[in-house]
Image (tube, helix red, strand yellow):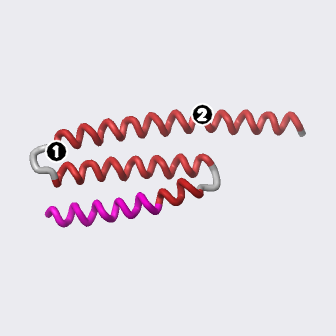
Amino acid sequence: MNNFFIICGLVLFALVAIVLIRVLLGPTVMDRMVGANMIGTKTTVLLIFIGTLYEGRLDMFVDFALTYALLNFIGTITCTRYFSKVQASEAAEEEIKN
């Protein structure tokens, strides 16, 4: 069973590396935000996998994963609201100039 979690963890780690390319090269800010959120979600699952490999300390890793997921969610919502307001104000300024 441990081999299953190790293989799944390695696959998730490879997916994080692929998404990191999207974050670095994303055409828009919102694409980068979605990529960062995907990395956060995969990291949460990786924390749970690590907790299952540590026998006897799963509760600690579940707490870490829940905290990380909550911070990831709040950070994503905050950044998305900020960047959407910035894009709306830039569009309004461009419309005034034209």
Q: Position of residue 68 (x, y in %)?
A: 34, 39
Whether residue 37 sits left or right of residue 82 in the image: it is left
Q: Position of residue 90 (x, y in %)?
A: 75, 37
Residue visible at 61% across and 47% down in the picture: 29
Whether residue 61 sits left or right of residue 20 in the image: it is left
Mark 1 to mark 2: distance in Å?
36 Å
Dominant secondary-structure state across the stretch colored magenta:
helix
Residue visible at 22% across and 43% down in the picture: 61
Q: Does 52 appear in magenta? A: no
Magenta stretch, residue numbers: 1-18
Residue 29, disc: none
Q: Sequence order check: which comes first, mark 1 or mark 2? A: 1
Judging by the rendered image, the residue that carries numbered circle 2 is 82
Q: Amino acid at mark 2?
A: Tyr
Judging by the rendered image, the residue that carries numbered circle 1 is 58
Residue visible at 9% across and 45% down in the picture: 56
Whether residue 91 sits left or right of residue 70 in the image: it is right
Check the image and report above or below for 21 versus 71: below
